[in-house]
Image (cartoon, grey):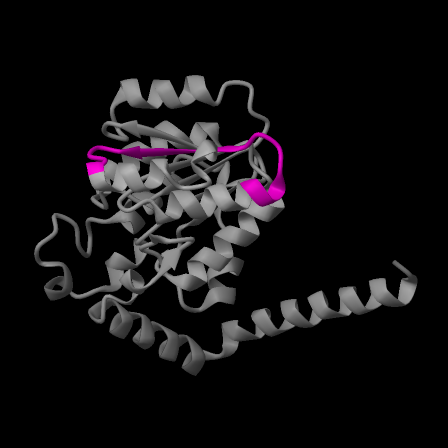
């Protein structure tokens, strides 16, 4: 690659960073994005998509962000709590397949439904997947994950199971010690804090009791992690505000 090409690439990233930085001052853009997110929640928008044939209950923008994280970090293991239909596992497995090497995604769920297990196990990327049935906050499950990842140089964690404050806080306590420096723990659905109670009346979580409140509590005693606000600032549309935690030390 010659100097001119390098300069053009550098200019692209400089312009991108300046544009993203300018969003801080654009109150109307932020308000429009926040209003849009609330409307998407009412419309159950995140249930519209699949990844390589399996439902992936995620905001598409967050999938793009996690793609960027995985490509940059190149983890040996990705630990995911919450499996559901398996789309997120397949997504992580597909990224690890592109990176190459022997990377694996470990999925944990208290109830892996048989029809989902069958579909995941017959997927072409299943060789990248390990599933553990059990509570993500069971000490025996956490110890099993620790043993599976022994010796790994790089680990990322994605939390997306029970969204109550106490559950997520315990997940953070169990799994963030495994996150490597420069890597991330992504806490999904922190945006529950900003939703009205009538939108989630059939769930045990809600405003004041959700992944975001757990993140705030966790960060009080864990200075090794910081919220990477540049990610949500770039995305504008995300279900994980304050949820992209980067390990700094």
Q: Is residue 113 visible?
A: no
- Residue drawn at x 57%, y 30% as measured from the top left: 102
Name the spot of residue 105 as percent of width and height, x first: 45, 35
Query: Viewed as shown, does residue 167 lie left or right of 31?
Result: left
Query: Viewed as shown, does residue 234 lie left or right of 219?
Result: right
Locate the C terminus by quadrant: top right
Locate the N terminus by quadrant: bottom right
Q: Is residue 136 above or below residue 203?
A: above
- Residue drawn at x 42%, y 36% as measured from the top left: 126
Name the spot of residue 232 as percent of width and height, x first: 46, 61
Q: Is residue 182 visible?
A: yes
Is 122 or 156 nearer to us in this picture?
Answer: 122
Which residue is farthest bottom?
A: 28
Is 69 or 48 nearer to us in this picture?
Answer: 48
Instruction: Give the tally of numbered discs.
Output: 0
Magenta part of the chain: 97-114
- In reply to whether residue 98 is colored magenta, the answer given is yes
Q: Is residue 155 above or below residue 208?
A: above
- Residue drawn at x 26%, y 71% as measured from the top left: 38
Is 130 or 64 nearer to us in this picture?
Answer: 130
Name the spot of residue 60 as percent of width and height, x first: 41, 62
Name the spot of residue 173 as percent of width and height, x first: 35, 30
- In reply to whether residue 10 is colored magenta, the answer given is no
Is 121 or 90 nearer to us in this picture?
Answer: 121
Q: Is residue 56 above or below residue 196?
A: above
Residue 30 appears in which quarter of the rendering? bottom left
- Residue drawn at x 57%, y 75% as measured from the top left: 22
Residue 117 appears in which quarter of the rendering? top left
């Amino acid at each position: 690659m010659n100097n001119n090409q390098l300069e053009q690439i550098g200019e692209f990233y400089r312009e991108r960073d300046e544009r993203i930085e300018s969003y801080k001052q654009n109150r109307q853009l932020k308000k429009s994005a926040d209003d849009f997110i609330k409307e998407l929640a009412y419309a159950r928008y995140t249930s519209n998509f699949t990844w390589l044939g399996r439902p992936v209950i995620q905001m598409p923008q967050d999938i793009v962000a996690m793609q960027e994280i995985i490509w940059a970090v190149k983890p040996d293991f990705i630990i995911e709590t919450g499996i559901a239909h398996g789309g997120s596992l397949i997504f992580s497995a597909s990224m690890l397949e592109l990176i190459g090497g022997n990377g694996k995604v470990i999925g944990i769920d208290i109830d892996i439904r048989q029809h989902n297990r069958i579909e995941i196990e017959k997927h072409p990327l299943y060789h990248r997947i390990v599933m553990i049935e059990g509570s993500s906050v069971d000490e025996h499950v956490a110890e099993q994950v620790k043993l599976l990842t022994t010796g790994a140089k790089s680990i990322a964690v994605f939390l997306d199971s029970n969204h109550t404050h106490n559950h997520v806080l315990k997940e953070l306590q169990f799994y963030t010690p495994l996150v490597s420096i420069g890597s991330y723990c992504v806490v999904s659905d922190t945006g529950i804090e900003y939703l009205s109670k009538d939108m989630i009346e059939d769930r045990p979580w809600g405003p004041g009791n959700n992944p975001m409140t757990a993140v705030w509590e966790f960060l009080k005693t864990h200075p090794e992690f910081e919220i990477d606000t540049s990610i949500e600032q770039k995305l504008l549309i995300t279900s994980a505000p304050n949820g992209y935690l980067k390990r700094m030390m």
